[in-house]
Amino acid sequence: MFKQDLTDTIAAIATPVGESGIGIVRISGKNALAIADKIFTDKANNKASSFKSFTLHYGWIVESFKIVDEVILTVMRAPRTFTKEDVVEINCHGGIVALRKVLDLVLDNGARLAEPGEFTKRAFLNGRIDLAQAEAVLDIIRAKTDSALKVGIEQLKGALSKEINKIRGEILDVLSVLEANIDFPEEDIDSVQLSAVFKKLKTVNNYLQKIIADSQFGKVLREGVHVVICGRPNVGKSSLLNALLKQERSIVTPIPGTTRDTIEEIIDIKGIPVRIVDTAGILEPRDLVEKKAIQRTKKYIDTADLVILLFDAGTKLHKDDLVLIKKLKKKKTIAVINKMDLKQKIEKDKLKKSFNKVVEISAKKIENLNLLEDAIADMVLGGKISVPESLLVANARHIQALKQIEKSVAEALNSLDNKLSLEFIAESVRDSLGGTEELLGKKFSEDLLDKIFNDFCIGK
């Protein structure tokens, strides 16, 4: 545990750097209003410190009586702000020069440049949110699908924290019973109490196991999956990528080997963020460029979570097809027969013997793509076509903490089964309680906070 210095005032650009209609410079801390007083003026020469909370004011940022930018200034007074400190937001024009100039003025007048994620860190340290909620902010920022956004919003609202606090309450109840009997050994714990302790711990353990089991879906929503489209030349790989994207991203021509490098995009399939890669369909390189393309294709296939192996329905299986089939037999793969509108020549039975999932589509005519999307979701979610509606944990730190809590609870149950001493059982229960406190941030280290918030952008 450490004592964070919250006495200084921090500032940063809170919007992406570049040309845009609006850019925001955010200030938080005890001197936020005083700094605004020095650099902001309106038509009536009012001071920012005189403005009411949650009000917006039109005016100018000035330096030595010269106008730097025309702005809207927002005042939010402590403690009802994101950081629970006085906050001022200056809505500037979005050009990088104007934003930098305003930020430099703020820093020159007493603020310090915020570290990555420091506004959210202050929200946590000042008790507005717990650590699990703070981490949800980054999940919301990085969400690539509606489902991932929903998981992040629910966690920010405290869905996970609420459940962990319930578990913590149950564990505390058990620990109080155990410690009471340890402190007063002359009053032996009776079988009824032991049975109640066992039942409560078993319920907690079962619930933890369910959350952990469902976390695979949360992790998928947070991190996405890596899907590679491969196949021999001219089977329609680029056409399939364009069809899934619903736009022309890859060049499509009847000339074999048009795609000489990998093309990568992120798409939403059934709420799953899918990083999909169209690879070069070349097995025998004609030059150094194609040799590099093949090496990259092999690397993508080796690291892929799922491979879509594409075939041409209008031709018999080629020797190059057979090479790919052999290579991918042990890889999670969907065999896709493209050009289903053509006269069928491909040997479907051979494909069905090699792969559990075989889907027929027409990428050019956009037919049966829904079946392919269902197959992708089914393979990714382990037999479930849609993401569960129950509580989902997506953060790796949270998942690891839950596993440690569950392990400690399981150890306590095992000790009860083996009729070990109450001191031994209580130690495992204390470990599980400590795990809940670490997850929620009731106990933390400076290294942990640095690791979490360094992933944030500056200004959030």
Image: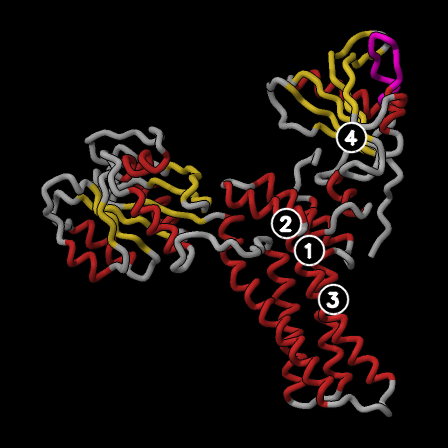
Considering depth in this image, is 219 or 255 the residue closer to the camera? 219
CA distance separating discs 2 and 4? 27 Å
Write down the residue under mark 3: 169
Horizontal and vertical percent for residue 18? 60, 22
Quadrant of the snapshot with the C terminus: top right
Horizontal and vertical percent for residue 235? 21, 41
CA distance separating discs 1 and 4? 29 Å
Residue 426 magenta-drawn?
no
Circle 4 or circle 3, nearest the eye: 3
Horizontal and vertical percent for residue 200? 67, 75
Q: Is residue 89 among the parts visible in the rendering?
A: yes
Considering depth in this image, is 100 or 165 the residue closer to the camera? 165
Residue 40 magenta-drawn?
yes
Write down the residue under mark 2: 155
Write down the residue under mark 4: 11
Q: Secondary structure at mark 2?
A: helix
N-terminal label among 4 and 3: 4
